[in-house]
Amino acid sequence: MAAPLSPDLSARPGAPILPYPAGPVVQSGQARREKVPMNLLAVRRLPVRVEALQPLAWRDYRRLWLASFLWYLARWVEVVVVGWLVLDLTDSAWHVALVGFYRNAPLLCFGLLGGVIADRMVRRTLLALAQGLNCAVMLGLWLLLVSGGLQYWHLAVGSLLLGLSWTMDWPARRTLIADIVGRPQILRALVLETTSMNITKVLGPLLGGSLVGLLGAAGCFLLLLGTYLGSLGAVLSIRQRNRTPAGQGPVLRTLVDGLRAVARQPAILGVLSVTMAMNMLVFPYVQLLPVFARDIHQAGPVGLGLLAAGDGLGSLLGAALLSLWPTLPRGRAFLGGSFLMSLALLAFSLLPAFLPAFLALVAMGVCHAAFSAYQSAITLTAITETLRGRAMGALALAIGTAPLGALLMGALATLVGAPAAVGLSAALGALWVLLTAWRLADLRRV
């Protein structure tokens, strides 16, 4: 009888450490095809709650998850701190909105290029460069603030650079997840990634508002610098993976080849279509939450904080539910989550009482978790490994339409009021999802 296979990090870098016997040393055809370690194949029948945490068995994934958690936390704190500083310097809500536009605009302008770079470089290196840029921005803003020379345009440029970092980071981070855990574990890994994002989506704004009062903006910038340095350290601790770049030909040709490959995948086209709908018509509601809190629900700042946290709380619940049902049909779950998310936002716009409106946002968050996890899972599994970066770059471009949606919803709210603007946008979003499900039926069969 063969001896159990024991974990040996020196022999198999990045392999999972599992607290149970791995079974005989046998390499099955399935393991060779999927590149799944045999000690993971031996535990397919674990309870669902344990299976949901299987990606954490990979050392590299744990380091990447920690880096992501720190990065997301810093991002949400930074949004609050920079927004407060801009309002203090300019006393203009328009300038606050512009800083948000600068932070998100690079995804729209350079999302595709970020995907090409993610395919041509070692992804860990690209993530390290992105975190290094974040550190440089925080250090620069801190020096300008303590020297008394900080002006609005410094914050605008800083937000633009942070957005550029995000454009490099996002395609590389999501494709690196697939590199580490392999195709069979992509969904579970993305659910855990989404969970970290949603935890920080709740904690970040609360911490940001509290820390501004306790430490001041200068102290917050130093804390953010330390958080980004921690994320950088976690990225650098990921072991180097041997991988073949997608090619070193002309960038334009590489980009065009990637777009052609994406265009030949109806499921990915469907994901891109729905992603544009959600980012242009649904997610921009966030900028109008102060209007709902003050003018519709008379709830004040505390009520605004609760409304802002509703989506994050619901997303945490949704991520937990997804971990219990990992075998849901991906395309239908993605489309259903997106459609129901639009309907939940429509209900929020119509509800005059605070508690039902808050619960509508929680329900929206539950659906948001399905949208976020399956969005990347479908894209990463529908295309070959050498094209994953460019596919995620196309997805980043679709996400980058959010600033255009924010401007559209703001203009519409000026004309017809915030509730009508949000309700109309949500209804159009639901209709867009239905049309996509009808025209790109392959997405329903994924």
Image (cartoon, helix red, strand yellow):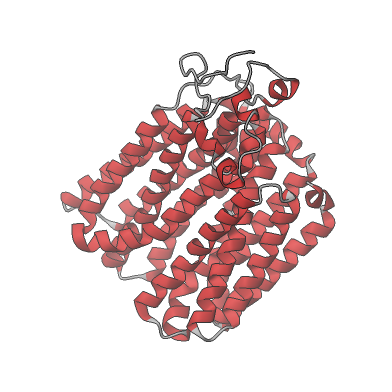
- Nearer to the camera, 334 or 296: 334
Foreground of the two, 318 or 394? 318
What residue is shown at x 73% (from left), y 45% (from top)? 268
Return the residue nearer the eye: 196 or 22: 22
From this view, report whether residue 339 is shown above or below residue 274.
below
Where residue 99 appears, as percent x and y from the top left, is: 41, 58
Residue 279 quadrant: bottom right
Farthest residue, direction left: 147
Pick whichever, 368 or 135, lies toward us.
368
In the rendered structure, the answer to whether residue 244 lies left or right of residue 223 reads right
283, above or below 171, in the image: below
Residue drawn at the location 59% of the way across and 36% of the way down:
115
Q: Residue at x 74, y 51 (%)?
A: 331
Residue 184 in view:
yes
**Where does residue 306 sit, x and y in percent of width and height?**
42, 72
x, y percent for residue 261: 75, 35
Going by the image, does 233 lie left or right of 1?
A: left
Relative to 429, say whether 274 is above or below: above
The N terminus sits in image quarter: top right
How many numbered markers are drawn?
Answer: 0
Classify 372 as above or below 95: above
**Residue farthest to the front, as pictured:** 1
Residue 398 shows in this picture: no
Residue 422 at x, y = what percent? Answer: 59, 75
What is the quadrant of residue 319 in the picture? bottom right
Instruction: Say whether residue 364 is left or right of residue 140.
Output: right
Residue located 67% across and 16% down the image: 26
